[in-house]
Amino acid sequence: MTRLLFSLFLPLALAGCGDAPEQPSAAPATAAPVVDTAASSPAADPALTAALRDQIMVDPALVQQANADVVRPPTEPQSGMVPPTDIAAAAHAQPATGGAATGETLRSAPAATGDCRQCAIARQSLTLGALAAAQGGRAGQCAANVDYSAGWANRLPRGLPLYPDARVAEAAGADGDGCALRVVSFASAAPMQRLLDYYYTKASDAGYTAEHHASGAEHVLAGNRRGGGTFMATMRARADGGTDVDLMADGG
């Protein structure tokens, strides 16, 4: 009897230990379609939609100079005008007479003498401030406070202006505390003798004495004015026929 019951229940027990029947899988979820409400809405504003979707207009000439003050620099240097170094064409165009470029009659500068101490100082001075400091006196004291800016070229004493075709390379100056220092470096297409005559005439008319010294290719025209004030013009001939000039005036 026991064996008969065991044989009847064994198939039922084995059936209960089998794997559970697989459940039907849920249907895959479908993503909801994206609806452009700005375009499909009946109340959408066409002007607003166009403004939001249109490309931004930029100026390609200015975009490279944007964000000049950020830590990361722009992709290219900012543009800046640099005076040309080749003035040979302008030199050939200059008239031969001394005052034709300025419309005035110029007096001839005195012949150069030797012992040009200022020529050696000019060769050794690497900056305009160093050139002024080497002069000593009030100019030397004011040289410690010089500020570099091209604007100083427009603030020379009235009696010692820039030559009409001057192309300024650098300028420095100092004002206040008894200082009225101006130092300008420029190039001219005119030959050196014309510039010597020009500044000799201007300085003499403004009340300065003017002495001419030379050492090799360097010439210096310098002097003082009664009541205070000094000037100095250091000149070097250029290979293209023009002249490089360092003009300094103090107390003018």
Image: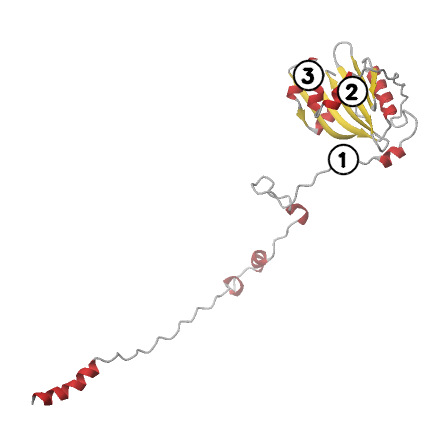
Disc 1 residue crowd, few under 14, some 14–19, many 20+, Cα 10 Å: few
Residue appearing at x 58%, y 39% in the figure: 69
> Which numbered disc covers residue 68?
none
Disc 1 marks a residue whose amino acid type is: Pro
Quarter of the view holding residue 26: bottom left
* Residue 228 visible to an observer of this rendering: yes
Q: Which residue is mark 2?
A: 119
Q: Secondary structure at mark 2?
A: helix
Of all residues, the one furthest to the right in this rendering is 97
Q: Say which quarter of the image contains residue 212.
A: top right
Quick one: label 1 or label 2, which is nearer the N terminus?
1
- Camera-side residue of 232 and 157: 232
- Looking at the picture, does residue 190 appear above or below residue 227? below
Q: Give the residue pinned by disc 1.
A: 83
- Rendered residue at 89%/34% (across/down): 92
Residue 158: percent from left, percent from top: 78, 20
Q: The residue tagged with tag 1: helix, strand or loop?
A: loop
View extreme (top): residue: 227
35 on left or right of 232: left
Question: Is residue 230 positioned above or below 85 on the image?
Answer: above
Label 1 or label 3, whichever comes before in sequence order: 1
The residue lying at 57 percent from left, 43 percent from top is: 72
Residue type at mark 3 is Gly
- Name the residue beneath numbered marker 3: 140
